[in-house]
Amino acid sequence: MVGGRSNLVRRLLPALVAVVAIPTVVTGAALVTMPAAASIAPPTVLSTCPPLPSGVVCSLPPVTPPSSPTTPSTTPFPPGPPTNLAATDVRTGSVTLTWTASTRGCCPIASYEITYTQAFNDIVWQVNVGNVTTATITTLSRTSQYRFSVAARDDQGRRSALSNGVTVVTPATDTGPDTTPPQAPTGLAAGSVTASSAVLSWSPSTDNVGITGYQVYKFDGLYISTLLATVTGTTYTVPLTSTYNIFYVRARDAMGNLSAAAGPVSVNRTGTPSTPPPTACRVTYTTQSQWAGGFVAAVTIHNIGSAPVSGWTLGFTFPGDQRITNAWNSTFTQSGAAVTLGNVAWNEVIPAGGSTSFGMQGAWTASNAVPTSFSLNGSPC
């Protein structure tokens, strides 16, 4: 204690030892300088120098002011959507995707979720690939058409809007002179409709080598496609039945590569109602995330009827002052509080007992109340 106190005095006031009278204690032959008992106190950290005799220099350690803590934003809003999604390598059983990372929302991005569907199949696949900007999806089928999109998730589970969509068609082979599928035919339409048949027609496709024919399919509205014929021309007469009459066409080249589909087109037989009967349905509207001035919502249409819905329009009215700013897996229009959403090419058909889901992002000021009344193709749902 004495030595420490003495060192402190010598460092701060070296010139005072010679001029200040300090009590002493003699122990044996050693002379030790001691402060008076009443003056012993805990050391004090000086912020300014005390008055000192002339010529005495006071040196204090530098004082670093505390920095202001930075508090991350805790407003609960999701990440921005990934952008520039592209397929960089398409093979018979796999596809490699790349995208530009999302803009962070309130919280750090934890992972990306790839959603994809196979054309004319009601299954939706989702794959979590971690916090990366490239991934390879495997176990695909050859000569098949797929649609991919990507969404980001933050570490609190909030999901962004979907990226742009990418459609790919896997080749028939990974080797050989031609691994490029033909371009899809265009302009598929049905004419000369009777009670038993209709004539399909379409515009020719193109290919880097050459088209050898067109495959005409009938679709059951769920996941079964039946090849009706392979023709070299651009017309074909299809038989009509009393149930579903949904058709599409794909071009084929010499290596067996198939194009993306033209269609589908739905045909109503002569003498049958041109407007399908009301559909038994149920709608689920879920607010996935909400923050001051914004929200993300998911909507699912459940077809609980016995027949597929081919082409759909969903209508509802917001009870609050919400405005949709963007939507994915659907088209949208809004007039005041009234909203109309419609199918896109890859979810046009809702199979009997099946469902389709889509989402939206929007803004609000006074209320983000959930809508409770819906109509599907003009009929209450």
Image (cartoon, rainbow, N blue to C red):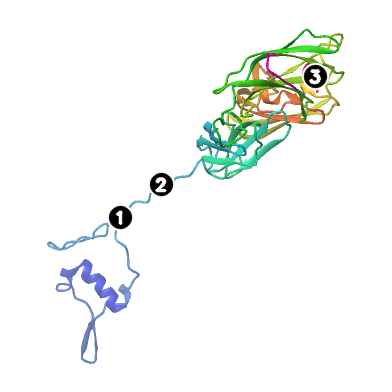
Label 3, label 2: how many angstroms apart (C-alpha)?
Answer: 69 Å
Res. 146 in view: yes
| Residue 123 occupies quadrant | top right
Q: Could you say whether the residue bearing mark 3 is in a helix, strand or loop?
A: loop
Q: Which residue in the structure is indicated by mark 2?
A: 68
Which structural element holds mark 2?
loop
Q: Residue furthest top?
A: 192
Q: Which residue is depicted at the point 27% across and 56% down?
A: 62
* Amino acid under disc 1: Val
Disc on the earlier residue, 1 or 3: 1
SS assignment at label 1? loop
Task: Please report the bounds of the magenta region as a residue range.
Answer: 229-234
Percent position (x, y) of residue 287? 67, 33
| Most distant residue in the left direction | 55
- Position of residue 57 in the picture relative to residue 102 (left or right): left
| Separation of marks 2 and 1 at Cα, in angstroms | 15 Å
Q: Which mark is residue 330?
A: none
Nearer-the-camera pick, 309 or 226: 226
Mark 3, residue position: 245
Badge 2: residue crowd in 10 Å (few <14, some 14–19, many ≥20) = few
Type of the residue with mark 3: Asn
Whichever of callouts 3 and 2 sits on the residue coming sooner in the sequence is 2
